[in-house]
Image (tube, grey):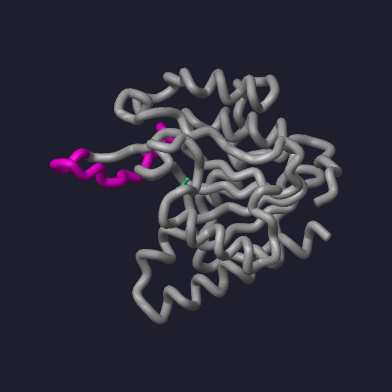
């Protein structure tokens, strides 16, 4: 993928005043000690984004799950498997992408031995926005794909509905285009035949992103 960075950092729907600066490695180190919201207390570690700093395409998920919490990398569990298959079917190379999440800590409720996923609250999402803004400012991707409602609303505003608005290009400041698609975890939870259709739509949306890079 050609490295022609966006001229300006891609903007989020709500302005972020305190965007941390520094290289991705420095940001990752700083985020490892993040105390901007209470989620760090029970999580194993911060799950910062992963991938080349020169990536032309950034994928943004929602928040790490139990597998990501233990491994410290985004999309390494069942949703990640589905996503990586869809990436390959779209003709993209997963190692050339930058993958990250809107919220960087696992949120869960302990039930016996199980850690049940809980959605990050609006204030936890807001507390994490500076890290996403910092990743966007450093990587300056030309194309961004938001996976699911949390990422899509962080990029495009709270009125955005993935079910209605997915697969449509939006401008994200100067030089970056973005679209939203289904979150792989949501696809895994859907009953058939909706699941197969949503999976095909995920591949189709990632194919649009792949074509936009050529
Ligand atoms: N779901 C996400 O949104 N991100 C991950 O990293 C894993 C599951």
Q: Residue at x 81, y 46 (%)?
A: 175
Which quadrant holds residue 23?
Answer: top right
Name the spot of residue 167 as percent of width and height, x first: 63, 66
Residue range highlighted in magenta: 110-125
Above or below, comparing residue 123 to residue 56 in the picture: above
Name the spot of residue 43 as percent of width and height, x first: 34, 30
Q: Residue at x 49, y 22 (%)?
A: 32
Above or below, comparing residue 93 to residue 67 in the picture: below
Q: Is residue 121 magenta?
A: yes
Q: Is residue 185 left or right of residue 100?
A: left
Above or below, comparing residue 18 to residue 56 in the picture: above
Q: Is residue 69 left or right of residue 164?
A: left
Q: Is residue 143 magenta?
A: no
Which quadrant holds residue 12?
Answer: top right
Name the spot of residue 147 as percent of width and height, x first: 54, 54
Name the spot of residue 197 as percent of width and height, x first: 49, 77
Please, which residue is most extreme toward the bottom here? 193
Rendered-image quadrant of the C terminus = bottom right
């Amino acid at each position: 993928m050609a490295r022609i960075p966006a001229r300006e950092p891609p903007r989020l729907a709500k302005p972020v005043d305190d965007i941390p600066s520094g290289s991705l490695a420095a940001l990752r180190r700083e985020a490892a000690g993040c105390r901007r919201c209470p989620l760090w207390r029970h999580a194993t570690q911060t799950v910062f984004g992963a991938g080349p700093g020169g990536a032309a395409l950034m994928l943004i998920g929602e928040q790490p799950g139990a597998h990501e919490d233990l491994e410290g990398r985004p999309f390494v569990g069942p949703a990640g498997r589905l996503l990586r298959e869809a990436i390959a079917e779209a003709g993209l190379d997963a190692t050339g992408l930058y993958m990250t999440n809107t919220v960087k800590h696992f949120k869960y409720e302990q039930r016996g031995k199980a850690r049940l996923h809980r959605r990050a609250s609006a204030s936890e999402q807001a507390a994490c926005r500076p890290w996403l803004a910092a990743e966007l400012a450093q990587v300056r991707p030309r194309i961004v794909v938001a996976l699911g409602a949390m990422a899509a609303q962080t990029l495009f505003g709270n009125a955005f509905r993935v079910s209605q608005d997915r697969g449509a290009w939006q401008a994200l400041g100067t030089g970056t285009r973005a679209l939203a698609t289904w979150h792989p975890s949501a696809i895994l939870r859907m009953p058939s035949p909706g699941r197969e259709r949503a999976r095909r739509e995920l591949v189709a949306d990632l194919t649009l992103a792949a074509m936009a890079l050529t």
